[in-house]
Image (cartoon, rainbow, N blue to C red):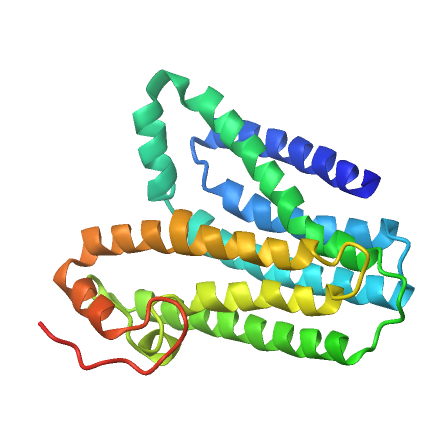
Amino acid sequence: MPDLVWVALGASLMMVVLWFVQRRRTDASLVDAGWAFGIGVSAVVLALLGDGDPLRRGVIGALGAVWSARLTGHLVRDRLLGKPEDGRYAMLRQSWGASAQRNFFIFFQAQAGFVVAFACPFFAIAADPRPFGSVLDIAGIALWALALTLVATADRQLARWRAAAVNRGRTCRGGLWRFSRHPNYFGEWLLWCSYALVAWGAPQWWLAPATAAFLLILLLGVTGIPYTEKRALASRGDDYRAYQRATSPFIPWFPKAETP
């Protein structure tokens, strides 16, 4: 897999540069935007280097670039511009003490590894020689568009809620957030499932569903929902507990009546 080797080297170099920037700024929040940007660049690079059907390569490269541009822009606005260091990284910086910079370097390189992991669907699709345009290809593109719309809508609704001072300390229950506590995570997972449809039947097709499964594990049990809800409970207490009891944690569904 020489193409993925180039992706790995590029991601590692990018994270070294970002590590120096965070050292200067004392703010590791940029690693999240760097991760999203790195995946988009990887999608384009793999589309250019792949030896599969040209139209298939062009489509998957464009999808990866659009996804990356939206998420990178969102993370820059939400976590970097005029914002203090994200609470996760501030807590790590404090707990690591004198070892913080060494540990952040290792952490940033681990994120380079995640870039490679999430580049795998693009690698599999870019190597597929079959002409683009099958029923599964069209279904995958349709699911991708639906999922991206869901994620963007959820992010926009939450940003609008947070922007109103009157909502400070309260949980957003409007729009998509009425049906799921994490509609953005659900939409993101659906988006990566869409790549599995496009990759189905390719020589390395299994890389795409494996990536979607890996993301689901991260969201449900590692860095996604558990950490997000821990922070929500710490900042919103009983209001968030009532929201938890009434609202589906992941897959959107009709809410129950809230109980005190």
Image: 52 above or below 97: below
The quadrant of the picture occupied by the C terminus is bottom left
Residue 52's x, y, as percent?
A: 89, 59
The residue depicted at 56 percent of the width and 59 percent of the height is 71
Q: Quick one: 194 or 7, which is closer to the camera? A: 194
Answer left or right for 131 relative to 197: right
Residue 169 x/y as whole percent: 19, 61
Residue pictured at 46% horizontal, 47% vertical: 80
Q: How many marks?
A: 0
Q: Which image quarter: residue 183?
A: bottom left
Query: Residue 88 appears at what percent x and percent y?
Result: 36, 41
12 versus 117 height, above or below: above
Q: Nearer the viewer, residue 192 or 154?
A: 192
Residue situated furthest top in the rendering: 98
Q: Locate residue 110 relative to residue 40 in the image: left or right.
A: left
For the N terminus, give its image quadrant: top right
Identify whether 66 is placed above or below 235.
below
Depth check: give the residue in front, 255 or 207.
207
Q: From the viewer's perspective, tell me whether residue 238 is left or right of residue 184.
A: left
Task: Residue 106 in the image: state x and y as whole percent.
Answer: 52, 26
Which residue lies at the image location 43% right of the left edge and 30% below the top edge? Answer: 26
